[in-house]
Image: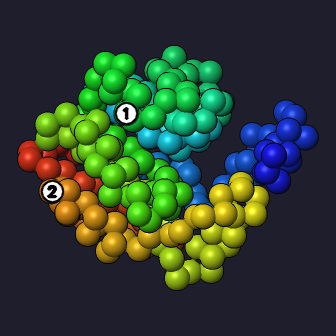
Amino acid sequence: MTVGSFIRGLAGPLERPLCDAYRALFMNVGRCAQQLQAAISSDCHLIDVGGGDGAVLDAILRVRPDLTATMLDLKTEVGKFLAPEIAPRVEIRAGTSIQDYLAQGGAPAACVLVSDVVHHVPADARTTFLHDCVRLLQPGGTLIIKDVAPGHLVSLASMYADRYITGDRHVRLIAPDDLVGLLRGLGLHASAPLLAPTERPNYAFAFRAVGNLQPHP
């Protein structure tokens, strides 16, 4: 059991506000969600890869009532922070990898969201992981990746928090240029940054191959 899971277990009904306060040390979920959703087309079904407790997806769906989603995660407990009014719009696929989802006949989506996942993937496995994410896209679809850039005090704090609180001792942050280069090698091109400079060290891009989806206002 990690330090983080132990504390969550003790928190009881205070778990959600405690986790929200912890996450707020590293990012403003509401502001980031507002900026990310602009890259998602109207009436879209999206796949959230590695969405965990669902806090980011919940924030996006709150401002986009036209969207529905599927959450894929290797964890067995997924989406616990989705609000009751949001949860009916989300299909939960707990304990399910991308390969499992596709093998089970899961449909590709117009948008795939990968939020704060890439830095948890070992460096030598990232190209394979990103290629699998691309496999989830419909032709002309959009892959949105949000992550944390190294080289900032907040980045350093988040890395040590991942290692010693959430228990991922192999976490390694990825620079924006390196992420863009990996996706370029897979044939996808990056948009302009989706997040304002005030959200640093958080950053995000929308990656597209052939054809573009029209952004939502």
| Cα–Cα gap, marks 2 and 1 | 20 Å
- In percent of width and height, residue 138 lies at 19, 34
Callout count = 2
Q: Earlier in the sequence, mark 2 or mark 1?
A: 1
- Return the mark for residue 15: none
Q: Is residue 35 visible?
A: yes
- Judged from this view, the residue extending furthest toward the left is 210
At horizontal 33% and vertical 72% (from top left) the residue drawn is 178
At horizontal 51% and vertical 69% (from top left) the residue drawn is 173
- Disc 2 and disc 1 in contact, CB within 8 angstroms: no
* Mark 2 Cα shell of 10 Å, populated few (<14), some (14-19), many (≥20): some
Q: Is residue 2 left or right of residue 66?
A: right
The secondary element bearing badge 2 is classed as loop
**Amino acid on which disc 2 is placed:** Gly
* Mark 1 Cα shell of 10 Å, populated few (<14), some (14-19), many (≥20): few
Q: Nearer the viewer, residue 105 or 156?
A: 105
At horizontal 45% and vertical 34% (from top left) the residue drawn is 97
At horizontal 76% and vertical 58% (from top left) the residue drawn is 165
Report which quarter residue 136 is drawn in: top left
Q: In this picture, is 9 found above or below 101?
A: below
- In percent of width and height, residue 49 lies at 44, 40
Report which quarter residue 102 is drawn in: top left
Residue for badge 2: 187
Q: Is residue 67 left or right of residue 50?
A: left
**Amino acid on which disc 1 is placed:** Gln
Q: Is residue 163 left or right of residue 171?
A: right
Residue for badge 1: 99
